Image (spheres, rainbow, N blue to C red):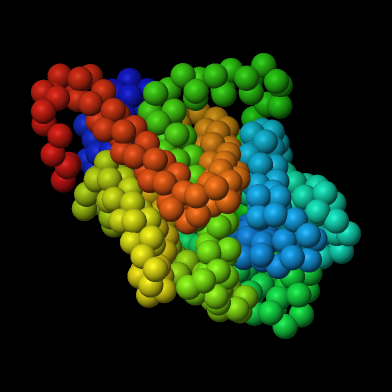
Amino acid sequence: MTPADTGASTVVDAAPAAPAVPDPTGSSDSSDSRMAPGGPGYRRMSFALFLAGVATFALLYSTQALLPLISGDLGVTASDASWTVAAATGGLALFVLPMSALSERFGRRTVMTASLAVAVTVGLLVPFAPSLPALVALRAVQGAALAGLPASATAYLAEEVRPRALVTAIGLFVAGNSVGGMSGRVITGWVAQEWGWRVAVGVVGLVAVACAVAFRLLLPAPRHFTPGSLRPRVLVRTVRDHLADPLLRRLYAIGALFMTVFGGVYTVIGYRLTEAPFSLPQGLIGSIFLVYLVGTVSASTAGRLVGRLGRRGALYLGAGTTAAGLLLSLAPSLPLVLLGLVLITAGFFAGHAVASSAVGKTAQHGRAQASALYQSAYYVGSSAGSTVGAVAFHSGGWAGTVGVGVLAVLGVVVITVSGSLAARRAAGTPVRALSLPR
């Protein structure tokens, strides 16, 4: 069966049944001209997209570790300041689908280059925002510009990399996201402690400029891209086809829920650590984000994780690890809070890498649109997590934020289980047989 027929099996099985139709992504033998580990251009491509991931997350979340300072400088509440994060992720979520359509017509590399150019330009203007509304507006524009990166990068990899190497290649891109998120927050934390949040955001902008230039110089020209149509009717039909696929719908929901946890936790953690019993200075709070290195490892090894547990098992492991971290972070002990953040980060990045790579494999056409819908759901989850997490913290403290995260993780588990049951019903397997695939 094709992915649309099974409803869930290709998300969750390490070794799905052979498809009834030939694999449109091509074979993985030596006659395949696409890139593979050790082959020509693969290392340059991996490093280029890694740098694109660094720039994307560094810019997108450049204000997140600085929210307490922004609140104090502009005289606004935590909920108000959180809009500097939500506006950026919301702008990305709204524009990722139109930008993916442009990439189908003008090429992945062209759109990614233009998106980075606009985003880094806006990043250099953000430090000069005179008020919260102006800052939020600039951040929304920046997020909209960055929308050209995630979906185009995933589609580029699906077209230029051999299928068996796809999960690993996407994992490296996601690893770049984690490094960008970490470095942006660590840099801003220490720079802001000495010179304020405006200088800190400006430094992140300069780092992103360097990443953007290196990305354009390193990324190999696409060899397997075929221009598509910009006709709205074609775009609407493609989107409708993807949304009609139950497997893709589950993947979109899983991405949104994982990001709801992550967005909420990292938007609020700075406020928690400035309060008693921790009362940490801004520099140390920024250094907390070094735990993103754990995400770099978990995302880059997602391919091996899927090989051992299957996609279903990998998603369960990611959800369980995230939930354990949330509960552990409730402890009034800094080492336990840090351990909780490590588990949350590892679980999130592993789950995200598995789900996003499954989208690229599942879509039989319009891969940029399929990836764009995933990214849109993913960043809607980020915006929702940032806003709802901050509101929950304001009303119920850290326990309120953790409660939001636990509910989102339960949603991931319920969706994965329902997909497993649907796949087994379609295959005629007894529902009780829910052991993890090997």
Looking at the rendered structure, the number of numbered marks drawn on it comes to 0
Could one spot residue 6 in this view of the protein?
yes
Write the residue at 39% across / 62% down.
329
Query: In the visual, does 307 lie left or right of 255?
Result: left
Q: Vertical placement of 165 versus 232: above or below?
A: below
Residue in front for this viewpoint, 357 or 276? 276
Q: Vertical placement of 110 versus 414: above or below?
A: below
Query: In the visual, does 428 lie left or right of 384?
Result: left
Could one spot residue 206 in this view of the protein?
no
Write the residue at 49% across / 40% down.
256
Residue in front for this viewpoint, 398 or 427? 398
Write the residue at 55% across / 75% down.
279
Q: Vertical placement of 384 versus 19: above or below?
A: below
* Residue 288 placement (x, y as % from top left): 50, 72
* Residue 153 placement (x, y as % from top left): 57, 49
Write the residue at 11% across / 28% down.
432
Give the quadrant of residue 6: top left
Residue in front for this viewpoint, 14 or 145? 145
Q: Which part of the image, by quadrant, shows the N terminus?
A: top left
* Residue 182 placement (x, y as % from top left): 54, 68
Q: Vertical placement of 225 versus 186: above or below?
A: above
In the orientation shown, which residue stands out farthest toward the bottom?
A: 194
Give the quadrant of residue 418: top left
Query: In the visual, does 11 lie left or right of 228?
Result: left
Q: Which part of the image, by quadrant, shows the C terminus?
A: top left
* Residue 190 placement (x, y as % from top left): 64, 79
